[in-house]
Image: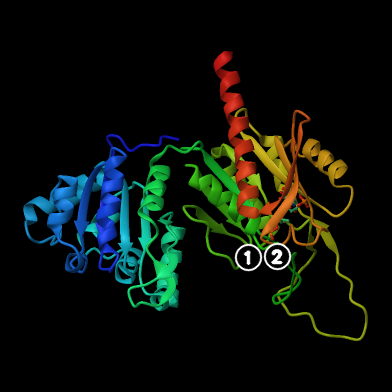
Protein backbone atom coordinates (compact mmCIF):
# COMPACT_ATOMS: atom_id res chain seq x y z
CA UNK A 1 0.00 0.00 0.00
CA UNK A 2 1.30 3.43 -0.94
CA UNK A 3 1.75 5.42 2.23
CA UNK A 4 1.87 8.81 0.58
CA UNK A 5 -0.37 10.94 -1.56
CA UNK A 6 2.27 12.38 -3.88
CA UNK A 7 0.76 14.04 -6.97
CA UNK A 8 -2.76 13.15 -5.82
CA UNK A 9 -5.53 15.76 -5.92
CA UNK A 10 -7.62 15.60 -2.75
CA UNK A 11 -10.80 17.67 -2.53
CA UNK A 12 -11.54 18.61 1.07
CA UNK A 13 -15.01 19.85 2.05
CA UNK A 14 -15.23 21.63 5.40
CA UNK A 15 -18.83 22.03 6.57
CA UNK A 16 -20.68 23.81 9.37
CA UNK A 17 -19.36 22.34 12.59
CA UNK A 18 -17.42 23.72 15.52
CA UNK A 19 -14.75 21.18 14.45
CA UNK A 20 -14.21 23.15 11.19
CA UNK A 21 -10.86 24.38 12.49
CA UNK A 22 -9.68 20.75 12.45
CA UNK A 23 -10.36 20.80 8.72
CA UNK A 24 -7.36 23.11 8.47
CA UNK A 25 -5.23 20.63 10.41
CA UNK A 26 -6.41 17.84 8.10
CA UNK A 27 -5.48 19.93 5.04
CA UNK A 28 -1.99 20.34 6.51
CA UNK A 29 -1.63 16.59 7.17
CA UNK A 30 -2.78 15.68 3.65
CA UNK A 31 -0.27 18.16 2.22
CA UNK A 32 2.49 16.70 4.40
CA UNK A 33 1.70 13.39 2.71
CA UNK A 34 2.30 15.04 -0.67
CA UNK A 35 -1.30 15.79 -1.70
CA UNK A 36 -2.44 18.76 -3.77
CA UNK A 37 -5.35 19.82 -1.55
CA UNK A 38 -8.31 21.77 -2.96
CA UNK A 39 -10.42 22.93 -0.03
CA UNK A 40 -13.98 24.11 -0.20
CA UNK A 41 -16.20 25.54 2.52
CA UNK A 42 -19.96 25.22 2.70
CA UNK A 43 -21.73 28.47 3.55
CA UNK A 44 -22.15 27.22 7.13
CA UNK A 45 -18.50 26.10 7.20
CA UNK A 46 -17.42 29.63 6.28
CA UNK A 47 -19.13 30.85 9.46
CA UNK A 48 -16.60 28.84 11.47
CA UNK A 49 -13.33 29.35 9.56
CA UNK A 50 -12.36 31.70 6.76
CA UNK A 51 -11.47 30.78 3.18
CA UNK A 52 -8.25 32.73 3.72
CA UNK A 53 -7.01 30.18 6.29
CA UNK A 54 -7.51 27.26 3.90
CA UNK A 55 -6.23 29.20 0.87
CA UNK A 56 -3.06 30.20 2.69
CA UNK A 57 -2.47 26.65 3.90
CA UNK A 58 -3.18 24.85 0.62
CA UNK A 59 -2.01 27.46 -1.88
CA UNK A 60 -5.19 26.82 -3.90
CA UNK A 61 -8.34 28.94 -4.29
CA UNK A 62 -11.15 28.05 -1.90
CA UNK A 63 -14.73 27.92 -3.21
CA UNK A 64 -17.55 28.91 -0.89
CA UNK A 65 -20.34 30.32 -3.02
CA UNK A 66 -20.81 28.32 -6.21
CA UNK A 67 -22.63 31.17 -7.88
CA UNK A 68 -19.90 33.74 -7.36
CA UNK A 69 -18.18 33.13 -10.67
CA UNK A 70 -20.50 30.95 -12.73
CA UNK A 71 -18.18 30.56 -15.70
CA UNK A 72 -15.44 29.21 -13.47
CA UNK A 73 -17.25 26.91 -11.04
CA UNK A 74 -19.26 25.26 -13.81
CA UNK A 75 -16.04 23.92 -15.21
CA UNK A 76 -14.26 23.68 -11.91
CA UNK A 77 -16.55 21.31 -10.03
CA UNK A 78 -16.45 18.84 -12.90
CA UNK A 79 -12.73 19.10 -13.58
CA UNK A 80 -11.90 18.85 -9.87
CA UNK A 81 -14.26 15.88 -9.52
CA UNK A 82 -12.48 14.16 -12.42
CA UNK A 83 -9.01 14.97 -11.14
CA UNK A 84 -9.71 14.02 -7.54
CA UNK A 85 -8.06 10.89 -6.19
CA UNK A 86 -10.40 11.21 -3.20
CA UNK A 87 -13.08 13.55 -1.88
CA UNK A 88 -13.10 14.07 1.89
CA UNK A 89 -15.85 15.80 3.82
CA UNK A 90 -14.46 16.61 7.27
CA UNK A 91 -16.00 17.70 9.49
CA UNK A 92 -19.32 16.60 8.02
CA UNK A 93 -22.31 18.21 9.75
CA UNK A 94 -25.74 16.53 9.97
CA UNK A 95 -26.91 18.92 7.25
CA UNK A 96 -24.03 18.04 4.90
CA UNK A 97 -24.54 14.30 5.51
CA UNK A 98 -28.25 14.62 4.68
CA UNK A 99 -27.44 16.53 1.47
CA UNK A 100 -24.83 13.98 0.40
CA UNK A 101 -27.21 11.12 1.12
CA UNK A 102 -30.05 12.71 -0.85
CA UNK A 103 -27.81 13.77 -3.72
CA UNK A 104 -28.59 17.49 -3.29
CA UNK A 105 -26.24 19.84 -5.10
CA UNK A 106 -26.59 23.30 -3.54
CA UNK A 107 -23.07 23.36 -2.10
CA UNK A 108 -19.85 23.07 -4.09
CA UNK A 109 -18.65 19.98 -2.17
CA UNK A 110 -21.98 18.23 -2.87
CA UNK A 111 -21.63 18.82 -6.62
CA UNK A 112 -18.09 17.44 -6.53
CA UNK A 113 -19.22 14.39 -4.54
CA UNK A 114 -21.95 13.76 -7.14
CA UNK A 115 -19.69 14.25 -10.14
CA UNK A 116 -16.70 12.23 -8.94
CA UNK A 117 -16.09 8.50 -9.27
CA UNK A 118 -13.20 8.66 -6.79
CA UNK A 119 -13.59 7.32 -3.23
CA UNK A 120 -15.61 9.60 -0.96
CA UNK A 121 -14.74 9.76 2.74
CA UNK A 122 -17.07 11.36 5.26
CA UNK A 123 -16.03 12.18 8.83
CA UNK A 124 -19.12 13.20 10.85
CA UNK A 125 -18.90 15.69 13.72
CA UNK A 126 -21.92 16.88 15.66
CA UNK A 127 -23.85 16.77 18.88
CA UNK A 128 -24.45 13.20 20.13
CA UNK A 129 -28.25 13.54 19.97
CA UNK A 130 -28.08 14.71 16.34
CA UNK A 131 -25.72 11.85 15.50
CA UNK A 132 -27.91 9.17 17.04
CA UNK A 133 -31.12 10.57 15.52
CA UNK A 134 -32.67 8.00 13.15
CA UNK A 135 -32.61 10.54 10.29
CA UNK A 136 -28.81 10.99 10.56
CA UNK A 137 -28.27 7.26 11.03
CA UNK A 138 -30.40 6.46 7.97
CA UNK A 139 -28.41 8.95 5.88
CA UNK A 140 -25.12 7.45 7.08
CA UNK A 141 -26.40 3.95 6.33
CA UNK A 142 -27.39 5.01 2.82
CA UNK A 143 -23.97 6.55 2.21
CA UNK A 144 -22.23 3.42 3.53
CA UNK A 145 -24.31 1.25 1.21
CA UNK A 146 -23.11 3.40 -1.71
CA UNK A 147 -19.51 2.70 -0.78
CA UNK A 148 -18.78 5.98 1.02
CA UNK A 149 -16.29 5.41 3.81
CA UNK A 150 -17.61 6.78 7.08
CA UNK A 151 -14.98 7.61 9.69
CA UNK A 152 -16.55 6.87 13.04
CA UNK A 153 -16.57 9.94 15.31
CA UNK A 154 -14.98 9.75 18.74
CA UNK A 155 -16.47 9.98 22.19
CA UNK A 156 -15.26 13.01 24.13
CA UNK A 157 -16.08 16.56 25.13
CA UNK A 158 -18.47 18.13 22.60
CA UNK A 159 -19.11 21.81 21.79
CA UNK A 160 -21.92 21.83 24.36
CA UNK A 161 -19.38 20.98 27.08
CA UNK A 162 -21.03 17.61 27.67
CA UNK A 163 -19.20 14.36 27.03
CA UNK A 164 -20.75 12.31 24.23
CA UNK A 165 -20.29 10.48 20.93
CA UNK A 166 -19.90 12.81 17.95
CA UNK A 167 -16.47 14.44 18.19
CA UNK A 168 -14.59 14.54 14.87
CA UNK A 169 -12.10 11.67 14.48
CA UNK A 170 -8.45 12.64 14.85
CA UNK A 171 -7.22 14.27 11.58
CA UNK A 172 -4.41 11.70 11.56
CA UNK A 173 -7.01 8.89 11.46
CA UNK A 174 -8.89 10.66 8.64
CA UNK A 175 -5.66 11.21 6.67
CA UNK A 176 -4.82 7.48 7.10
CA UNK A 177 -8.27 6.58 5.73
CA UNK A 178 -7.62 8.80 2.70
CA UNK A 179 -4.30 7.06 2.08
CA UNK A 180 -6.00 3.66 2.34
CA UNK A 181 -8.85 4.70 0.04
CA UNK A 182 -6.45 5.97 -2.61
CA UNK A 183 -4.17 2.91 -2.55
CA UNK A 184 -5.06 0.43 -5.32
CA UNK A 185 -6.87 -2.57 -3.83
CA UNK A 186 -5.51 -6.06 -4.40
CA UNK A 187 -8.83 -7.04 -6.06
CA UNK A 188 -9.04 -3.91 -8.22
CA UNK A 189 -11.47 -4.53 -11.09
CA UNK A 190 -12.00 -8.23 -10.23
CA UNK A 191 -15.67 -9.30 -10.61
CA UNK A 192 -16.81 -11.17 -7.52
CA UNK A 193 -20.19 -12.84 -7.06
CA UNK A 194 -21.27 -13.66 -3.51
CA UNK A 195 -24.28 -15.68 -2.37
CA UNK A 196 -25.53 -14.94 1.11
CA UNK A 197 -28.35 -15.55 3.55
CA UNK A 198 -30.98 -18.27 3.63
CA UNK A 199 -33.51 -19.30 1.00
CA UNK A 200 -37.21 -19.75 1.67
CA UNK A 201 -39.06 -22.69 0.18
CA UNK A 202 -42.81 -22.08 0.21
CA UNK A 203 -45.11 -24.64 1.78
CA UNK A 204 -48.17 -22.59 0.86
CA UNK A 205 -48.64 -18.82 0.24
CA UNK A 206 -48.01 -17.91 3.89
CA UNK A 207 -45.58 -20.55 5.20
CA UNK A 208 -42.09 -21.57 4.19
CA UNK A 209 -39.15 -23.81 5.12
CA UNK A 210 -35.96 -21.88 5.80
CA UNK A 211 -32.89 -21.86 8.04
CA UNK A 212 -31.13 -19.62 10.56
CA UNK A 213 -28.69 -17.87 8.20
CA UNK A 214 -28.57 -14.13 8.88
CA UNK A 215 -26.43 -13.23 5.86
CA UNK A 216 -23.73 -11.76 8.12
CA UNK A 217 -20.94 -14.04 6.84
CA UNK A 218 -21.74 -13.50 3.16
CA UNK A 219 -22.19 -9.76 3.59
CA UNK A 220 -18.88 -9.45 5.48
CA UNK A 221 -17.16 -11.24 2.58
CA UNK A 222 -18.84 -9.00 0.00
CA UNK A 223 -17.87 -5.86 1.90
CA UNK A 224 -14.26 -7.00 2.36
CA UNK A 225 -13.92 -7.77 -1.37
CA UNK A 226 -15.48 -4.42 -2.36
CA UNK A 227 -13.19 -2.54 0.02
CA UNK A 228 -10.25 -4.18 -1.74
CA UNK A 229 -11.38 -2.93 -5.14
CA UNK A 230 -13.55 -5.79 -6.43
CA UNK A 231 -16.79 -5.20 -8.35
CA UNK A 232 -19.09 -7.17 -6.11
CA UNK A 233 -22.61 -8.44 -6.72
CA UNK A 234 -24.45 -10.16 -3.90
CA UNK A 235 -27.27 -12.58 -4.62
CA UNK A 236 -29.00 -12.67 -1.28
CA UNK A 237 -31.85 -14.51 0.34
CA UNK A 238 -34.13 -12.59 2.74
CA UNK A 239 -32.11 -10.99 5.56
CA UNK A 240 -32.57 -7.97 7.80
CA UNK A 241 -29.08 -6.45 7.73
CA UNK A 242 -27.95 -3.43 5.64
CA UNK A 243 -26.69 -3.88 2.06
CA UNK A 244 -22.89 -4.30 2.20
CA UNK A 245 -21.05 -1.09 1.31
CA UNK A 246 -20.15 -0.61 -2.33
CA UNK A 247 -21.89 -3.78 -3.57
CA UNK A 248 -24.66 -4.43 -6.09
CA UNK A 249 -27.53 -6.43 -4.71
CA UNK A 250 -29.95 -8.94 -6.18
CA UNK A 251 -32.56 -10.09 -3.70
CA UNK A 252 -34.04 -13.56 -4.15
CA UNK A 253 -36.23 -15.83 -2.10
CA UNK A 254 -36.09 -19.45 -3.19
CA UNK A 255 -33.21 -21.79 -4.07
CA UNK A 256 -34.48 -21.87 -7.66
CA UNK A 257 -34.40 -18.05 -7.88
CA UNK A 258 -30.91 -17.97 -6.36
CA UNK A 259 -29.74 -20.57 -8.89
CA UNK A 260 -31.21 -18.57 -11.80
CA UNK A 261 -29.53 -15.30 -10.71
CA UNK A 262 -26.18 -16.97 -9.99
CA UNK A 263 -26.08 -18.92 -13.25
CA UNK A 264 -26.91 -15.72 -15.17
CA UNK A 265 -23.94 -13.91 -13.66
CA UNK A 266 -21.45 -16.74 -13.18
CA UNK A 267 -19.96 -16.72 -16.72
CA UNK A 268 -18.89 -13.07 -16.27
CA UNK A 269 -17.45 -13.34 -12.77
CA UNK A 270 -13.90 -14.24 -11.84
CA UNK A 271 -14.63 -15.37 -8.28
CA UNK A 272 -17.76 -16.97 -6.83
CA UNK A 273 -18.08 -17.09 -3.05
CA UNK A 274 -21.01 -19.31 -2.02
CA UNK A 275 -21.78 -18.40 1.58
CA UNK A 276 -25.55 -18.79 1.28
CA UNK A 277 -27.34 -21.48 3.22
CA UNK A 278 -29.31 -22.75 0.22
CA UNK A 279 -32.19 -25.12 0.96
CA UNK A 280 -31.34 -28.68 -0.05
CA UNK A 281 -35.04 -29.46 -0.51
CA UNK A 282 -38.11 -27.61 -1.69
CA UNK A 283 -41.71 -28.60 -1.12
CA UNK A 284 -43.30 -30.58 -3.95
CA UNK A 285 -46.57 -29.14 -5.16
CA UNK A 286 -46.64 -26.08 -2.88
CA UNK A 287 -50.06 -24.67 -3.62
CA UNK A 288 -51.51 -21.21 -4.00
CA UNK A 289 -54.05 -21.83 -1.22
CA UNK A 290 -53.29 -21.73 2.48
CA UNK A 291 -53.17 -25.22 4.01
CA UNK A 292 -56.12 -25.77 6.32
CA UNK A 293 -55.67 -26.98 9.84
CA UNK A 294 -56.90 -30.52 10.48
CA UNK A 295 -56.71 -33.26 13.09
CA UNK A 296 -54.84 -35.75 10.94
CA UNK A 297 -51.02 -35.73 10.56
CA UNK A 298 -49.92 -33.90 7.42
CA UNK A 299 -47.15 -35.15 5.16
CA UNK A 300 -45.33 -33.07 2.63
CA UNK A 301 -43.05 -34.34 -0.06
CA UNK A 302 -39.63 -32.69 -0.28
CA UNK A 303 -37.75 -32.73 -3.54
CA UNK A 304 -34.02 -31.99 -3.82
CA UNK A 305 -33.04 -28.55 -5.12
CA UNK A 306 -30.26 -28.15 -7.67
CA UNK A 307 -26.82 -27.70 -6.12
CA UNK A 308 -25.77 -24.25 -7.39
CA UNK A 309 -22.14 -24.50 -6.32
CA UNK A 310 -21.69 -27.96 -7.83
CA UNK A 311 -23.19 -26.71 -11.10
CA UNK A 312 -20.73 -23.81 -11.14
CA UNK A 313 -17.95 -26.32 -10.37
CA UNK A 314 -18.93 -28.26 -13.49
CA UNK A 315 -19.12 -25.14 -15.68
CA UNK A 316 -16.01 -23.44 -14.31
CA UNK A 317 -13.69 -21.96 -16.98
CA UNK A 318 -9.92 -21.56 -16.64
CA UNK A 319 -9.17 -18.55 -14.45
CA UNK A 320 -12.40 -18.70 -12.44
CA UNK A 321 -12.10 -19.35 -8.73
CA UNK A 322 -14.77 -21.01 -6.60
CA UNK A 323 -15.06 -20.57 -2.85
CA UNK A 324 -17.55 -22.79 -1.06
CA UNK A 325 -18.63 -23.28 2.52
CA UNK A 326 -19.44 -26.42 4.46
CA UNK A 327 -21.80 -26.03 7.39
CA UNK A 328 -21.44 -29.19 9.46
CA UNK A 329 -22.58 -30.44 12.85
CA UNK A 330 -20.32 -33.53 12.99
CA UNK A 331 -17.11 -34.83 11.39
CA UNK A 332 -16.34 -31.33 10.15
CA UNK A 333 -13.14 -31.99 8.22
CA UNK A 334 -14.04 -35.33 6.56
CA UNK A 335 -17.37 -33.90 5.33
CA UNK A 336 -15.71 -30.67 4.21
CA UNK A 337 -13.05 -32.58 2.24
CA UNK A 338 -15.81 -34.52 0.47
CA UNK A 339 -17.59 -31.29 -0.48
CA UNK A 340 -14.36 -29.68 -1.71
CA UNK A 341 -13.83 -32.55 -4.14
CA UNK A 342 -17.48 -33.21 -5.09
CA UNK A 343 -18.27 -29.56 -5.91
CA UNK A 344 -14.88 -28.92 -7.59
CA UNK A 345 -14.19 -25.80 -5.53
CA UNK A 346 -10.77 -24.18 -5.13
CA UNK A 347 -11.21 -23.04 -1.52
CA UNK A 348 -13.64 -24.41 1.02
CA UNK A 349 -14.44 -22.84 4.36
CA UNK A 350 -15.53 -25.44 6.89
CA UNK A 351 -17.50 -24.20 9.88
CA UNK A 352 -18.98 -26.29 12.68
CA UNK A 353 -22.44 -24.78 13.08
CA UNK A 354 -23.17 -26.82 16.23
CA UNK A 355 -20.65 -24.72 18.20
CA UNK A 356 -22.22 -22.00 20.35
CA UNK A 357 -21.25 -18.40 19.51
CA UNK A 358 -20.14 -19.03 15.91
CA UNK A 359 -21.74 -19.84 12.56
CA UNK A 360 -25.42 -19.06 12.03
CA UNK A 361 -26.62 -15.63 13.23
CA UNK A 362 -23.56 -14.90 15.36
CA UNK A 363 -21.15 -12.00 14.72
CA UNK A 364 -18.24 -14.44 15.03
CA UNK A 365 -17.00 -17.48 13.18
CA UNK A 366 -14.25 -20.09 13.31
CA UNK A 367 -13.26 -23.02 11.14
CA UNK A 368 -10.83 -24.29 8.55
CA UNK A 369 -9.79 -23.16 5.12
CA UNK A 370 -9.27 -26.13 2.81
CA UNK A 371 -7.46 -25.70 -0.49
CA UNK A 372 -7.82 -27.88 -3.57
CA UNK A 373 -4.09 -28.74 -3.36
CA UNK A 374 -4.69 -30.42 0.02
CA UNK A 375 -3.47 -27.62 2.30
CA UNK A 376 -5.62 -26.96 5.39
CA UNK A 377 -5.41 -23.86 7.58
CA UNK A 378 -7.19 -23.46 10.90
CA UNK A 379 -9.01 -20.13 11.38
CA UNK A 380 -9.47 -19.45 15.10
CA UNK A 381 -12.61 -17.79 16.43
CA UNK A 382 -12.84 -14.11 15.43
CA UNK A 383 -15.34 -11.45 14.26
CA UNK A 384 -16.92 -12.32 10.92
CA UNK A 385 -15.37 -9.14 9.42
CA UNK A 386 -11.87 -10.42 10.29
CA UNK A 387 -12.80 -13.99 9.23
CA UNK A 388 -13.91 -12.56 5.87
CA UNK A 389 -10.57 -10.73 5.46
CA UNK A 390 -8.69 -14.02 5.99
CA UNK A 391 -10.79 -15.71 3.30
CA UNK A 392 -10.28 -12.79 0.89
CA UNK A 393 -6.52 -12.91 1.61
CA UNK A 394 -6.58 -16.55 0.48
CA UNK A 395 -8.58 -15.63 -2.65
CA UNK A 396 -6.06 -12.89 -3.53
CA UNK A 397 -3.20 -15.33 -2.96
CA UNK A 398 -4.77 -17.99 -5.23
CA UNK A 399 -5.50 -15.43 -7.98
CA UNK A 400 -1.93 -14.13 -7.71
CA UNK A 401 -0.50 -17.64 -7.86
CA UNK A 402 -2.46 -18.30 -11.06
CA UNK A 403 -1.32 -15.03 -12.63
CA UNK A 404 2.25 -16.04 -11.81
CA UNK A 405 1.77 -19.50 -13.35
CA UNK A 406 0.23 -17.99 -16.48
CA UNK A 407 3.10 -15.52 -16.88
CA UNK A 408 5.71 -18.28 -16.50
CA UNK A 409 4.09 -20.40 -19.27
O1 LIG B 1 -25.50 -16.18 7.40
P1 LIG B 1 -24.84 -16.30 8.76
O2 LIG B 1 -25.85 -16.23 9.90
O3 LIG B 1 -23.70 -15.34 8.92
O4 LIG B 1 -24.22 -17.78 8.88
C1 LIG B 1 -23.11 -18.11 8.11
C2 LIG B 1 -23.23 -19.53 7.53
C3 LIG B 1 -23.22 -20.55 8.65
C4 LIG B 1 -24.53 -19.66 6.75
C5 LIG B 1 -22.02 -19.72 6.56
O5 LIG B 1 -20.84 -19.57 7.28
C6 LIG B 1 -22.08 -21.08 5.87
O6 LIG B 1 -21.61 -22.09 6.37
N1 LIG B 1 -22.69 -21.11 4.65
C7 LIG B 1 -22.97 -22.32 3.89
C8 LIG B 1 -24.21 -22.98 4.43
C9 LIG B 1 -24.54 -24.26 3.69
O7 LIG B 1 -25.55 -24.32 3.05
O8 LIG B 1 -23.64 -25.20 3.76
P2 LIG B 1 -23.76 -26.67 3.07
O9 LIG B 1 -22.65 -27.44 3.65
O10 LIG B 1 -25.15 -27.18 3.16
O11 LIG B 1 -23.48 -26.39 1.53
C10 LIG B 1 -22.18 -26.46 0.95
C11 LIG B 1 -21.98 -25.40 -0.10
O12 LIG B 1 -22.86 -25.62 -1.21
C12 LIG B 1 -22.25 -24.01 0.37
O13 LIG B 1 -21.25 -23.16 -0.21
C13 LIG B 1 -23.63 -23.68 -0.18
O14 LIG B 1 -23.79 -22.27 -0.47
C14 LIG B 1 -23.64 -24.49 -1.47
N2 LIG B 1 -24.99 -24.97 -1.87
C15 LIG B 1 -25.70 -25.81 -1.09
C16 LIG B 1 -26.92 -26.28 -1.51
C17 LIG B 1 -27.43 -25.88 -2.77
N3 LIG B 1 -28.62 -26.30 -3.23
N4 LIG B 1 -26.69 -25.05 -3.53
C18 LIG B 1 -25.49 -24.59 -3.11
O15 LIG B 1 -24.84 -23.82 -3.83
**Could you say where residue 323 lies in the image, as x and y percent from the top left?**
67, 41
Q: Is residue 115 visible?
A: no
**Could you say where residue 376 lies in the image, as x and y percent from the top left?**
77, 35
User: Tag 2, which secondary structure?
Assistant: loop
Q: Which mark is residue 17?
A: none
Q: Which residue is mark 1?
A: 238
**Could you say where residue 67 lies in the image, as x and y percent from the top left?**
10, 61
**Could you say where residue 222 lies in the image, as x and y percent from the top left?**
56, 50
Mark nearer the N terminus (1 vs 2)? 2
Q: Which residue is mark 2?
A: 200
Q: Residue at x 35, y 54 (%)?
A: 171
Which quarter of the figure has residue 299?
bottom right
Q: Are marks 1 and 2 in contact (CB under 8 Å)?
A: yes
Query: Residue 24, relative to residue 138: is it above or below?
Result: above
Tell which of 27 and 85 is nearer to you: 27
Query: Residue 353, relative to residue 156: is it above or below?
Result: above
**Gap between marks 1 and 2 measured at Cα:** 8 Å
Q: Is residue 358 visible?
A: yes
Amino acid sequence: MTERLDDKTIVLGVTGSIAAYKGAELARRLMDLGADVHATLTRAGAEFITPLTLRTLTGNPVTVDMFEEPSEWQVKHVSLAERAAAVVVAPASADAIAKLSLGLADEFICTVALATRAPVIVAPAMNDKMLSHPATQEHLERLRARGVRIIEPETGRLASGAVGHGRLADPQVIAAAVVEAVAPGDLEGVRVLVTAGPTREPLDPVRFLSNRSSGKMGYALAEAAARRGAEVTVVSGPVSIPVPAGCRMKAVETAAEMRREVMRRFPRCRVLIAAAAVADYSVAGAGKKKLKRGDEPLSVELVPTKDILAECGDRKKAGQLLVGFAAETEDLLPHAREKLAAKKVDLLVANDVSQPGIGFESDRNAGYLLLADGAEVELPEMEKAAFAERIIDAVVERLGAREGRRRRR
